[in-house]
């Protein structure tokens, strides 16, 4: 039987790994947080599998050259573990060069793999975006 506290801590580590890699532009590391058939759903895109996820995050409009600082802050992760599957819901706020940029929720389904916990499905929901955002418009509410 798995240790519930250890599973929750491993999932928190996965949430942080995704965020740190994304903030530093390490898209391969971020995509590696997904199971082989894992899906990332965010405003304007749905991608399945690490290679497709990496491609979805690097295609499209070029980044705003004024955006040299990005930090995602995750709060209140609510993690429920059921054997080799889990769910997590977290709030996040993103800061950029212009200050608070956007905020929303992550809704996650996770799966235990041979490599550890990975995202089976991550839905990114944007609840608020600053009028001075340095990202493309993406409010979903």
Image (cartoon, grey):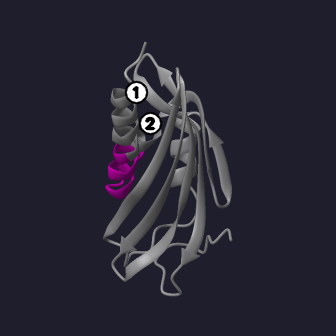
Q: Which callout, 1 or 2, points at the residue further toward the start of the chain?
A: 1
| Frontmost residue, 141 versus 39 | 141
Foreground of the two, 139 or 76: 76
Q: Residue at x 39, y 35 (%)?
A: 8
Q: Which part of the image, by quadrant, shows the N terminus? A: top left
Q: Position of residue 86 (x, y in %)?
A: 54, 32
| 88 vs 4, nearest the viewer | 4
Residue 79's spot in the image, x, y percent? 48, 41
Q: Position of residue 92 (x, y in %)?
A: 45, 62
Q: Quadrant of residue 37?
A: top right
Which range is magenta? 16-27
- From the image, give the main secondary structure of the stretch colored magenta: helix
Which residue is under mark 2? 33
**In front of the other: 48 or 84:** 84
Percent position (x, y) of residue 112? 48, 23
Q: Residue at x 42, y 56 (%)?
A: 76
Gap between marks 1 and 2 measured at Cα? 20 Å
Q: Which mark is residue 47?
A: none
Q: Which residue position holds label 1? A: 4
Whether residue 36 is situated above or below residue 105 in the rendered picture? above
Q: Residue at x 45, y 76 (%)?
A: 101
Q: Give yes or no for residue 24 being in the magenta stretch.
A: yes
Secondary structure type for disc 2 = loop
Quadrant that contains the C terminus: bottom right
């Amino acid at each position: 039987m798995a240790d519930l506290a250890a599973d929750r801590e491993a999932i928190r580590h996965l949430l942080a790994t995704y965020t740190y890699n994304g903030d530093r532009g390490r898209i391969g590391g971020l995509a590696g947080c997904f199971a082989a058939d894992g899906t990332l759903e965010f405003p304007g895109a749905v991608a399945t599998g690490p290679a497709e996820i990496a491609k979805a995050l690097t295609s499209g409009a070029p980044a705003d050259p004024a955006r040299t600082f990005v930090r995602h802050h995750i709060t209140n992760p609510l993690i429920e573990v059921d054997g080799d599957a889990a769910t997590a819901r977290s709030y996040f706020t993103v800061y950029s060069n212009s200050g608070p940029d956007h905020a929303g929720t992550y809704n996650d389904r996770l799966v235990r793999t041979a490599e550890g916990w990975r995202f089976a499905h991550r839905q990114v929901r944007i609840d608020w975006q600053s009028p001075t955002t340095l990202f493309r418009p993406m409010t979903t509410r």
